[in-house]
Image (cartoon, rainbow, N blue to C red):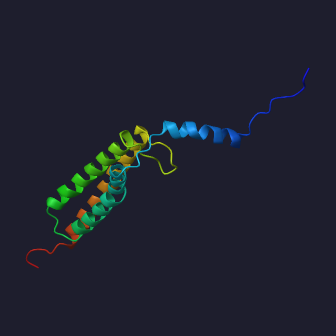
Amino acid sequence: MSTHRAERPSPKARSAQDAPAKAQQAPSVATVGGCLVRVCWMVLGNGALFFMAVHLAMSAPALSLVDAAFWGTVALIIGLRYLDVRKLGGLTVTNEPATMAHWRRYAIALLVVSLLAWAIARLVGGASAPRVGQ
C-alpha cells in the first residue's frame, strides 16, 4: 500500500487555475466603440454636467435650454452606462463584471447628485441675478 497522499493545491494555485475560467465568463469588448462609450459616460458626460451647472449658477434664474440639456445629459449618461453593462461587458472599479445592480446604484447616485448640483446651481443663479429696478 502506498502512503502517498495527494497534495491539495494552495489557494494561490487554485486562484491561478480559476483565472482562465473567470476570463471566459466576463465578456470583454475591447473595441473602439466600447472604449468610446466608457469615455463618454465616465469623463465627457460628467464634465459636461459640471460646466452646465457652472453656467446655470452664473445665469438668470429662469429655466432655459441649458436646464433641458443638463437633464438630457443625465439621461444620456445613464443610458450609456446601461449599454456598457448590458452589451459591452462593463466592469466595476475592482475589475469585476458589472451587474444590473451596479447600474441601478449608479443611476440612483447620479440622479441624486445631479439633482443636488442642479438645485444648488439654480439657487446660486437666482441669488446672483440682477434685480430689475435696482
- Residue at image point 47% right, 42% down: 97
Q: Position of residue 9 (x, y in %)?
A: 74, 36
Report which quarter residue 100 is drawn in.
top left
- Residue at image point 44% right, 44% down: 28
Q: Position of residue 86 (x, y in %)?
A: 36, 39
Q: Is residue 16 above or below residue 55?
A: above
Seen from the viewer's position, the closer of residues 105 and 73 is 73
Report which quarter residue 114 is drawn in.
bottom left
Toward the front, the furthest residue is 1
Seen from the viewer's position, the closer of residues 6 and 101 is 6
Seen from the viewer's position, the closer of residues 79 and 95 is 95
In the picture provided, is 133 more to the left or to the right than 91? left
- Residue at image point 43% right, 43% down: 102
Tell me the quarter of the image containing the C terminus. bottom left
Tell me the quarter of the image containing the N terminus. top right
Q: Position of residue 35 (x, y in %)?
A: 37, 53
Q: Position of residue 40 (x, y in %)?
A: 32, 56
